[in-house]
Image: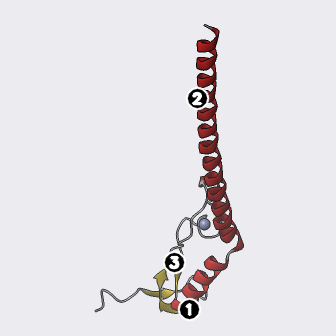
């Protein structure tokens, strides 16, 4: 059982000797340039005791910039979907116009001949 027990050392936050767990952020960002938050800009994730780990997780979940990223991402996806929809509608309209012109010129061709 000794091998599976968490390392006991000084917590990076409260500096108390406690069993520690590595904090791993679960959030994502929009791009490489955005990896500047307090978690992603760390070289090494912190080793935290259970209490600090929980507090840190809560902070990550409530971080406005991360939530903003998620919201921006949602908007981008919605906009992309709209653009794609419009593009398809336009392509269909263009096709219809081409077919209309083809039909009209075809008819014109037959009537003038
Ligand atoms: Zn702690
Ligand atoms: Zn981050």
- Mark 2, Cα crowd under 10 Å, few <14 / some 14-19 / many 20+, is few
Q: Is residue 4 left or right of residue 87?
A: left
Establish if 73 lies above or below 52: above
What residue lies at 59% left-to-right and 39% top-to-bottom? 92
- Mark 3, Cα crowd under 10 Å, few <14 / some 14-19 / many 20+, is some
Establish if 37 lies above or below 86: below
**Residue 105 visible from this viewpoint:** yes
What residue lies at 50% left-to-right and 74% top-to-bottom? 24
**Residue 36 visible from this viewpoint:** no
Establish if 48 lies above or below 27: below
Secondary structure category for the residue under label 2: helix
Residue 51: mark: 1
What residue lies at 62% left-to-right and 78% top-to-bottom? 61
**C-alpha span from label 1 to label 3:** 12 Å
User: Under 8 Å from ligand 1: the CB of mark 3?
Assistant: no
Residue 23: mark: 3
- Residue 34: percent from the left, percent from the top? 65, 58
Callouts 1 and 2 close, C-beta under 8 Å: no
In the picture, which quadrant includes the C terminus? top right
Answer with the quarter of the image where residue 112 lies.
top right
Residue 99: mark: 2
């Amino acid at each position: 059982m000794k091998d599976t027990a968490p390392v006991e050392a000084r917590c990076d936050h409260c500096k108390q000797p406690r069993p520690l767990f590595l904090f791993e952020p679960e959030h994502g960002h929009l791009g490489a340039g955005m990896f500047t938050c307090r978690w992603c800009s760390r070289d090494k994730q912190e080793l935290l005791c259970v209490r600090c780990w929980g507090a840190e997780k809560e902070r990550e979940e409530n971080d406005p910039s991360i939530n903003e990223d998620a919201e921006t991402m949602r908007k981008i996806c919605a906009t992309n979907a709209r653009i794609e929809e419009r593009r398809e509608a336009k392509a269909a309209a263009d096709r219809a116009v081409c077919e209309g012109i083809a039909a009209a010129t075809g008819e014109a061709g037959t009537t003038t001949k």
